[in-house]
Amino acid sequence: MIGLGTLINTCAIIAGGIIGIFLKKGLPERYKNTIIQTVGLAVMIVGISGALQSMYIVVEEGHLSREYIMLMVLSLVIGGIVGEFLNIEEYLNKMGMWFKQKLSFNDSNFSQGFVGASLLFCVGAMAIVGSLEDGLAGNPGTLIAKSILDGVTAMVFASTLGVGVVFSSIPVLVYQGGITLLAGFLKPWLTDVVISQMSLVGSVLIMAIGINMLEIKKLKTGNMLPAIFIPLIYYMLSHLIR
């Protein structure tokens, strides 16, 4: 069944989030602060390791060579400008507030949990590759593996940030479901090189999410989201112009 992987992923986030909410009720405030700091640190490490993995390749005699640096910088700058123009972060926050008001949730961290978890679950390479495999071959394997990771992450996030994390399943459903439906069109353009470039940019955004969680500096990570797709657009344009 095409789309099964995204449905499983969505359900895993909801289930993990609900478990985390029950855990939250029994946690003293000082434990919540410690948990969110350690999770933020872990998210930063995941982002750094992903960026290094996508950035460096082993060449002759075991030396390391950097790749895609210039395109990464351009992607972040152009994507940030586009995201700022579209004001994506503001719309994500408004969506979170809309859910909070309509469903009468008394949770001060609702928007933070909704926006942060939505971005974290969407920016990784597994979301793109898994959705393509699901759409082209009906193979949900990668997304099922992602579901396990996302379910555990949702549980930890929800134990500190609350019910907003559960509602992050909606952007995941739309984002991954959209890629699955468009898989036939996107597949010729999403080469291994393009996916590596998109993964590099995504890893940088994961680092930004970690910085926000650690409250080092407030970054508009949502407005940087279009940066992930700049390598794909660049690749498509470069081939169309030839």
Image (spheres, rainbow, N blue to C red):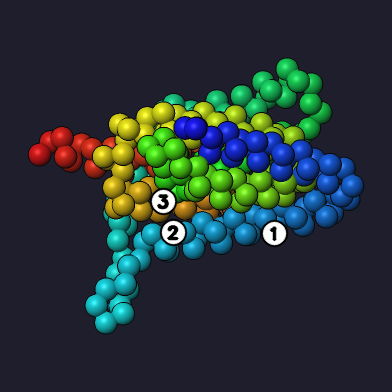
Which residue corresponds to mark 2? 51
Q: Residue at x 66, y 46 (%)?
A: 151
Q: In this view, does 118 lie to the left or right of 57?
A: right
Quadrant in the picture for residue 113: top right
Judge by depth and name the residue closer to the eye, 45 or 138: 138
Identify residue type, mark 1: Thr
Q: x%, y% of residue 237?
A: 20, 36
| C-alpha span from label 1 to label 2 | 20 Å
Which residue corresponds to mark 1? 38
Which residue corresponds to mark 3? 199
Q: Is mark 1 on a helix, strand or loop?
A: helix
Identify residue type, mark 2: Ala
In the displayed structure, would residue 237 be above or below residue 94? below
Judge by depth and name the residue closer to the eye, 156 or 105: 156
Q: Do the residues labelled 1 and 2 touch (CB within 8 Å)?
A: no
User: Is residue 142 shown to the viewer in this render?
Assistant: yes
| C-alpha span from label 1 to label 3 | 24 Å
